[in-house]
Image: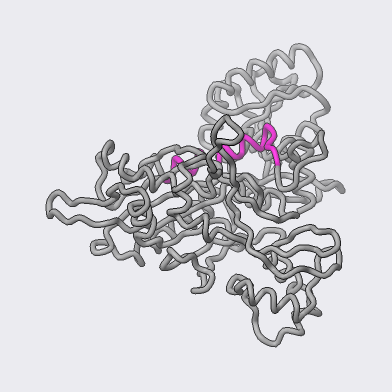
Amino acid sequence: MEKIVALCKRRGFVFPSSEIYGGLANAYDYGPYGAELLRNIRNLWWSTFIHKHQDMKGIDTQIILHPETWVASGHVASLVDFLVEDTVTHMRYRADHLIEDWLKKPKNAEKIKTSVVVENMSMVEMAEFIHTHSVKSPQGNVLTDPKKFNLLFETSLGTVADNKAVAYLRGETAQGIFTNFKNILDTQRVKLPFGIGQIGKSFRNEITSGQFVFRTFEFEQAEIEYFFDPEVVDWNILLEQWKKDMWRFVTEFLGISSDNLRWRRHTDKERSHYSKDTYDLDYKFPFGWKELWGVAYRTDYDLKQHTAHSGANLVWKNNETGKVFTPHVIEPALGINRAFFMVLNDAYHEEEVEGKVRTYLKLHPSLAPVKIAVFPLQKDDTLKQRALEVFQTLQQRYVVELDDAGNIGKMYRRQDEIGTPFCVTVDFQTNEDNSVTVRARDTMEQSRVPISDLEAYFFERL
C-alpha cells in the first residue's frame, strides 16, 4: 500500500488535500492522471449500465435535497456509527474498527473461543467486548463506552444568521433517484422493469484513517435503482442477474483478477432495516477484504416512505390492467473511489529487468489515463518536429502525451508507472522510411510500424 500511495503522489494521481496548510484528514485531491482514471471509470460504468441498456435512464440530482428527504429515508435516525474516545488524547475511533484490529493480532485471536462477527455486534455488545478484553486505543489508552454518531453532514440554508434552515449534504445518491421517480414516469416512456442511475458525490462524517481513498468524508457513488413488479418478476432471479453483471464489469471491463474478489452475504443483524437481502462484492485491499460494490433488494420501502412524508403518489399504474401498486427495487451501488483504488492496486506490478526493478501499472487500455506516449529518441530539432507531427495526428483520436525531457530509459519508466499501454519513439530511421518504434508496456516488445499505419495499429489494440 505504501508503494501505491507513493506512486500516486510522485506521478500525479492523488495528492493530500490542502497539503500546503498541513493537509486535511480523510481528504484527497486527484491530480491530472487520477482525474483521467476516475473519468474513465465513470464513463465505462455509464456506457455499460446506462447507454447500452434500453431499460435504463440516467439523471443528475442535487447534493443538497429537501431535509425531509433524509427523515423519510431513515438516515437522520439510523445512519450512525458507534464511536469510542481515547480518554487521554480525546481522539475518536470507530469501535468496530478497533475490535477488528484487536482480533487480527494472533495472540488475541487465540483468546476468543467462538467466532466473532463484528458486523453483527450491537452497541452494547461492542461495549462489553471492549471492556472484557481491555481493547485500547492505537495510543494504548483506555477507551470510553461506544456512543452513536450520526454520519450525515449537517449544514444550513439562508443568509441571515438567526434565520437559517437545517439541511444535509446527501449521504447517498439513491434518494435523489426516488424523489424523481414521478418525474421520470411523467417525462419518459418507460415500462416496468426499468432502472434509473446516476453518478455523484456523497458525504459522510466518518471517523477513520489509514485507508487512503477507500474511506473519505467526500466520495463518489454510481447507483442504480431498478424498479419492478414483484408479482411478475422473481426478485431472487433479478438479484442474481445483477450480481452476474457486476462481476462481469469488474473482471472483464476493469480487468480485475477474480482471485481478489468474493461475494459476501449480509447477516440478518448487519442488513439494513429496509433490505430483504444484501450482498457485497468484496475486494482484497491491502488492509483486508472490504466492500467495493453492494447490491440490495430494498423492496418498496423507499417509495412508500417518500409517499408518506411528501404526500406525492409514487405508484405505478398498469394502463392495460388498471393495477396500481408501489414498485419494488433492486439497488446496485458502486463506490467510484474504491474502484479507483482497486484498479491501481490490482494493476501495480514490479519485476526485475537487467538487475533493476521495473514498476508498471498493468491497466486495462480503456482505463489508462494516457493511451500513447510519443517522444524523440534524442534532443534533435528534426526528431522533435517529427514527434510533434505524430503526436498531433494521434491526438485526434486518443489521449496522447508528448515527452522530450530526459533520456529514452527515463521516459519509458515514467510512462510505465502511469500505465501508458504504448510508447512511440521517433528516431533517425524515421527520416529514412517514415516508420517509428512502438513499445508495448506489458511485454516491452518493440515493433517497427509505418507512421501511415499507426491509427489502424492502435485501433486494434486500444
Decide whether residue 85 is among the magenta residues: no
Name the residue rendered at 29%, 50% in the picture: 314
> In the figure, 251 relative to 396: above or below?
below
Image colouring = one colour
Res 150 → quadrant: bottom right
Q: Is residue 394 left or right of residue 408?
A: left
In the image, residue 222 lies at what x, y percent?
A: 50, 46
* Nearest the eye: 12 or 460: 12
**Residue stretch rendered in magenta on the structure:** 28-49
> In the figure, 396 relative to 98: above or below?
above
The C terminus - image quarter: top right
In the image, residue 309 lies at what x, y percent?
A: 37, 52
In the image, residue 363 lies at what x, y percent?
A: 63, 44
Q: Main secondary structure of the magenta part?
A: helix
Q: Which residue is situated farthest in the bottom direction here?
A: 113
The answer to whether residue 347 is visible is no
In the image, residue 114 lies at what x, y percent?
A: 66, 85
Name the residue rendered at 60%, 50% in the picture: 204
Name the residue rendered at 61%, 34% in the picture: 161
Q: Is residue 431 left or right of residue 121?
A: right
The answer to whether residue 145 is visible is yes
Name the residue rendered at 28%, 63% in the picture: 230
* Nearest the eye: 394 or 248: 248
* Nearest the eye: 432 or 234: 234
The N terminus - image quarter: bottom right
Q: Is residue 423 left or right of residue 7?
A: left
Decide whether residue 38 is among the magenta residues: yes
The number of callouts visible is 0
